[in-house]
Amino acid sequence: MIQIKNLTKEWNTKGKNLTAIENINLSINKGEFVSIIGPSGCGKTTLLKLIAGLIKPTSGEIIVNGELSKRNSIKKLSVVFQNPVLLPWRNVLENVNLSLELDSGLKSSVTDKIRLVGLSSFKQHYPKELSGGMQKRVSLARALVLNPELLLMDEPFGALDELNRNKLNLELLKIHRRLNPTILFVTHSISEAIFLSDKIVILSDCPAKIKDVVEIRLPKKRTIELKETKKFQDYVKCVRQKIS
């Protein structure tokens, strides 16, 4: 699905080159759930933007489904940001439908995606009438309405309390099992990364390099109680040690 080869990204700041990402090599299989974790400011969001084709690498290449990644080259790609970015004058149905309005060639069921994120009873509600967690669900439904093969998520649940975060983690896993997109998920939470992922990519401090890739061998169908098991806690300890 995704092949990243010798990827480097430099920024020119005040006449000086700052290396954000240096010589990253990574393979991601179709349908995998991969979390990216590392210190704040290490380049996690930059890596997502490079994969999405929103910015160009300084050197190296990203191949998605056999094609070089560049702006508008990846079909069936969706991005979910930390901020839901909902239009306040549009209700849930209209916000989710926005992607289809922007691309008339797309065909999808808006109501099905709203139901999938558990908001069927709130289709006519406006953003100001929704909780923070519900706004995140709308943002996710808007991304899913594109029927993406590749879903990039940049700390989408970072601002939520633990209860709502757990609920959305469970919903996301259900969606992943049903639709089977390839998901790249940026998070600062070690526990969240382990709970959601097939594997975790651990980045170093800036300039970001891959310190390690940890395979997560836990049951596909996961419950919150899994976090209390010794095996889960062993993964937490392992990943924490590799980050530090």
Image (cartoon, grey):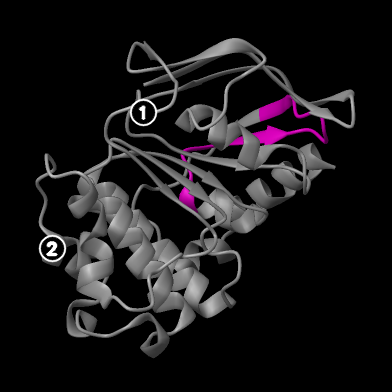
Tell me the quarter of the image containing the C terminus.
top right
Q: Is 202 displayed left or right of 95 in the figure?
A: right
Q: Is residue 223 visible?
A: no
Q: Give the residue furthest to the bottom.
A: 129
Q: What distance separates the C-alpha of mark 1 from that of mark 2? A: 26 Å
Report helix, strand or loop for mark 2.
Answer: helix
Q: Quadrant of residue 114?
A: bottom left
Residue 99 x, y percent position in the rendering = 25, 52
Q: Dot 1, crowdedness within 10 Å: few (<14), some or many (≥20)?
A: few
Residue 74 x, y percent position in the rendering = 34, 26
Of residues 14 and 169, the one nearer the viewer is 14
Instruction: Give me the disc on residue 42.
Output: none
Q: Quadrant of residue 35?
A: top right
Q: Quadrant of residue 23?
A: top right
Q: Is 111 displayed left or right of 176 in the figure?
A: left
Tell me the quarter of the image containing the N terminus.
top left
- The stretch in magenta equals 196-212
Give the amino acid type for the residue marked by disc 1 in the picture.
Answer: Asn
What residue appears at the point 64 percent right and 46 percent down from the top-left corner? 235
What residue appears at the point 48 percent right and 70 percent down from the top-left corner? 166
Does 235 appear above or below 98?
above
Whether residue 204 appears in magenta in the rendering, the answer is yes
Q: Which residue, given by chain and number where applicable, does mark 2 sit on?
A: 112
Give the amino acid type for the residue marked by disc 2 in the picture.
Answer: Asp
Q: Which residue, given by chain and number where applicable, does mark 1 sit on?
A: 72
